[in-house]
Image (cartoon, rainbow, N blue to C red):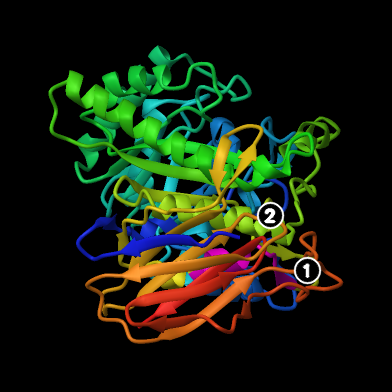
């Protein structure tokens, strides 16, 4: 096969990686919360009911901002139900997922969970703009963040949380363009209530960071027009606009699935263009950044039948996709897409964290284990901190049904503060190794520290309860750095991490 090539030069960069790019998402959906992060009585549970085996894996994963409590769930959420003595909290029907919500895990438990992960775990709270509005958002903000001396801040202290939660990052609703959303709105309706809510929240705290709802996907009929209409109302009041995207192989079209990041990059670039168009129309120098606060591989085609069959159970097994090596390679490519746009994508949340389309799986009363997708995320979070270098590949290509001609190589590189460089690369070929040649200009690098790959002779190999360690990254031999050139061979259908110093 023809060699794939690119050049790295510190004079040509994309931007600095915001740590929030490695965020995740905890929604009251299926077993993400109950028997996921929270399972009183589990052998590893601490005195707050949090599974310590899960906490250990979450720390290893390296997640930062964690979005909560939804997702579709938030559009029926009454925050008051989730605070105070657990025995007094009401049970409610969750219309989004046809389940019964017990509220045993609520706002205080979420904040405690973040604190136990570590200081890197930042709250990202969504407010309900589906069935509720400005008043309820302000009440939640006062309860969560005001120090003391008001009815709601004193109520928080009475509930056992004297110190404010300090939530800086807020989502103004969720997927409000989606007809499936409880309280679905037109762009004009949503833009108005988002602007009113943002303006009021800034009266309490001018320093809050706010995320307006963008389209639920690039395939929505209202895409781009929705963003333009919403931003016309909110441009000077919000900091980010959201993007959501999920990918799966449809109708056996694996070649297009492997090129999913082509769509993700197009989505990002189109939203950036729309944001900047609105800014130009408003003659504003402000730049709206992107919050890609839901992304993943998700086998959605089977989800509707799963949900429709439910009869209001507690924490049912929903969306528990078991990921293959192929899924993990696509997942890694999506991470590369986010890094390649780090100048404007300043928040991103992998949906979700545990059990529900997640990198971490658990069994009630039993073990927790890493899915195949765990490894690309953990490696990107660990080594993808610093400045993204501009990577323009010259690669062999292949034909896809959905995206036309696509590169077999998808790659990016990040230069850390200490001068070390990490190359992240995916080979989309299912059958052939891909030779790689990288010219290193102006970079003081002398050796290859490590080349690891996630690949397998069986692209359908998975980690399961029975075989939790079937798949893991392995070292790759033969990668060399000589006379300012990096040479490597990327295995077929592989996610690669090459570290240089």
Residue underneath mark 1:
457
Q: Earlier along the polypeptide chain: callout 1 or callout 2?
A: 2
Q: On the picture, is 116 further left or further right than 44?
A: left
Nearest to the observer: residue 377 or residue 420: 420
Q: Estimate the x, y position of residue 210 in percent, counting from the top left.
A: 32, 39
Helix, strand or loop at disc 2? helix
Image spot of residue 380 (x, y percent): 47, 66
Identify the residue position indicated by label 2 in the image. Answer: 327
Question: Which residues lie in the magenta part?
Answer: 368-379
Left or right of residue 205: residue 396: right
Q: Residue placed at 49% from the left, 17% from the top?
A: 222
Q: Dividing the picture into quarters, in which one does residue 283 lie?
A: top left
- Relative horizontal placement of residue 69, taking residue 10 as reference (left or right): right
Q: Nearer the viewer, mark 1 or mark 2?
A: 1
Q: Would you call the spot at circle 2 few (<14 residues within 10 Å), some (14-19), or many (20 or more)?
A: many
SS of the residue at dot 1? loop
Based on the picture, tell me whether residue 43 belongs to the magenta stretch: no
Instruction: Residue 197: tell me if it is visible.
Output: no
Percent x, y of residue 290: 36, 41
Instruction: State the CA–CA distance, disc 1 to disc 2.
Output: 14 Å
Viewer-proximal residue among 475 and 33: 475
């Amino acid at each position: 096969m023809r060699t794939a090539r690119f050049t790295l030069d510190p004079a040509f960069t994309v931007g600095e990686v915001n740590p929030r790019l490695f965020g995740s998402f905890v929604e009251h959906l299926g077993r993400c919360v109950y028997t996921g992060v929270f399972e009183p009585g589990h052998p590893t549970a601490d005195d707050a009911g949090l599974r310590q085996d899960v906490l250990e894996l979450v720390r290893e994963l390296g997640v930062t901002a964690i979005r909560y409590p939804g997702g579709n769930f938030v559009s029926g959420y009454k925050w008051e139900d989730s605070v105070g003595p657990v025995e007094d909290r009401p049970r409610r029907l969750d219309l989004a997922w046809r389940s019964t919500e017990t509220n045993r895990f609520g706002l205080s438990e979420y904040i405690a969970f973040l604190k136990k992960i570590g200081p890197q775990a930042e709250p990202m709270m969504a407010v309900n703009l589906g069935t509720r509005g400005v008043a309820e958002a302000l009440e939640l903000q006062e309860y969560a963040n005001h120090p003391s001396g008001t009815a709601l801040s004193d109520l928080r202290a009475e509930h056992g949380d004297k110190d404010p939660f300090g939530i800086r990052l807020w989502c103004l609703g969720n997927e409000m363009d989606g007809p499936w959303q409880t309280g679905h709105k037109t762009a004009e309706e949503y833009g108005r209530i988002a602007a009113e809510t943002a303006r009021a929240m800034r009266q309490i705290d001018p320093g809050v960071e706010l995320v307006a709802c963008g389209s639920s996907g690039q395939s929505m009929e209202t895409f781009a027009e929705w963003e333009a209409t919403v931003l016309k109302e909110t441009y000077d009041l919000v900091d980010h606009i959201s993007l959501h995207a999920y990918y799966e192989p449809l109708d056996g079209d694996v070649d297009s699935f492997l090129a999913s990041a082509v769509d993700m990059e197009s989505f990002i670039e189109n939203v950036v263009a729309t944001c900047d168009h609105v800014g130009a129309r408003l003659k504003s120098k402000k730049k709206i950044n992107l919050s890609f606060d839901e992304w993943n591989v998700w086998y959605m085609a089977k989800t509707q039948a799963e949900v429709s069959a439910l009869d209001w159970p507690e924490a049912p097994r929903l969306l528990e996709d078991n990921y293959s090596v192929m899924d993990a390679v696509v997942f890694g490519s999506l991470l590369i897409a986010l890094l390649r746009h780090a100048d404007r994508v300043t928040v991103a949340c992998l949906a979700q964290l545990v059990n529900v389309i997640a990198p971490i799986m658990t069994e009630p009363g039993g073990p927790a284990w890493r899915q195949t997708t765990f490894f690309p995320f953990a490696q990107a979070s660990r080594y993808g901190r610093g400045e993204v270098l501009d990577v323009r590949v010259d690669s062999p290509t292949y034909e896809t049904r959905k995206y036309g001609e696509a590169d077999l190589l998808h790659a990016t590189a990040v230069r850390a503060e200490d001068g070390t460089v990490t190359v992240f690369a995916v080979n989309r070929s299912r059958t052939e190794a891909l030779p790689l040649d990288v010219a290193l200009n102006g970079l003081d690098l002398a050796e290859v520290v490590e080349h690891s790959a996630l690949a397998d002779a069986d692209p359908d190999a998975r980690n399961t309860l029975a075989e939790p360690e079937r798949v893991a990254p392995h070292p790759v031999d033969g990668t060399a750095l000589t006379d300012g050139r990096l040479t490597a061979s990327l295995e077929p259908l592989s996610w690669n991490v090459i570290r240089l110093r």
